[in-house]
Amino acid sequence: MCHYSCVITVFRRKLFAGAGDERGAVAVELALVFFPLMFMIFLLFELCRVTYISSALNLATAEASRYAAVAKISDKDYERIFREKLQNDVPLWPSLTKDTNLTISVKYCDTLNDIITDNCDSQSYEQKPLAVYHVGYAYSSIVPFVPDLITESYLQRTTIYVQEYQRNKT
């Protein structure tokens, strides 16, 4: 019976031997865990932000170019129409992005060969049934290690539509 109590006593001494010498352990654990955890949280936020902006560009490009292609718009400022559509249809766009980083261009073409050879006109839309809508967003990341060249090329959208009101004129 003494043997069992001696084993328990020795076990308790070895188990709790370092319990009194743990001063500073919390600071070391915090230093080892806090910064990688914050880095992972910021990285996750950055990936969510890139995904949201990419999805918003897809949606806005499709909706705005469809709207401009189908409707006969008396005001031919397609860039302004597109920006308004983006502000109205994508509610979080202003809070997650800078509007100055957004580039929008509309080119009008006669044939598909003109689109392939980039022989399109950005001024004259008359008698040009095809329109090429190009939207780009110059993405700047919060986390500095994300290369801008990868995300900038990733955040560009181009849509080609038949301008319904111009198609009947040709």
Image: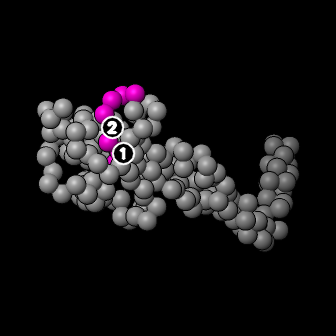
Is 144 part of what is drawn in magenta? no
- Looking at the image, can residue 51 be seen? no
Q: Secondary structure at mark 1?
A: loop
Q: Residue at x 52, y 56 (%)?
A: 139
Q: Amino acid at mark 2?
A: Cys
Instruction: From the viewer's side, name the closer residue of 80 and 19.
Output: 80
Q: Residue at x 36, y 28 (%)?
A: 112
- Left or right: residue 17 compared with residue 126: right
Q: Secondary structure at mark 2?
A: strand
Q: Amino acid at mark 1?
A: Asp
> Which is nearer the N-term, disc 1 or disc 2?
2
Which quadrant of the structure image shows residue 32?
Answer: bottom right
Q: Residue 140, percent across and down? A: 55, 59
Pointer 1: what residue?
121
Q: Quadrant of the N terminus?
A: top right
Q: Residue at x 38, y 41 (%)?
A: 120
Q: Residue 94, percent across and down? A: 36, 64
- Looking at the image, can residue 105 be seen? yes
Instruction: From the viewer's side, name the closer residue of 20 and 81.
Output: 81
Q: Residue 2, percent across and down? A: 84, 46
- Left or right: residue 145 compared with residue 117: right
Q: Quadrant of the C terminus?
A: top left
Q: Which residues are magenta?
A: 106-113
Q: Residue 158, percent across and down? A: 40, 40
Is 108 part of what is drawn in magenta? yes
Pointer 2: what residue?
109
Which quadrant of the structure image shows residue 130?
Answer: top left
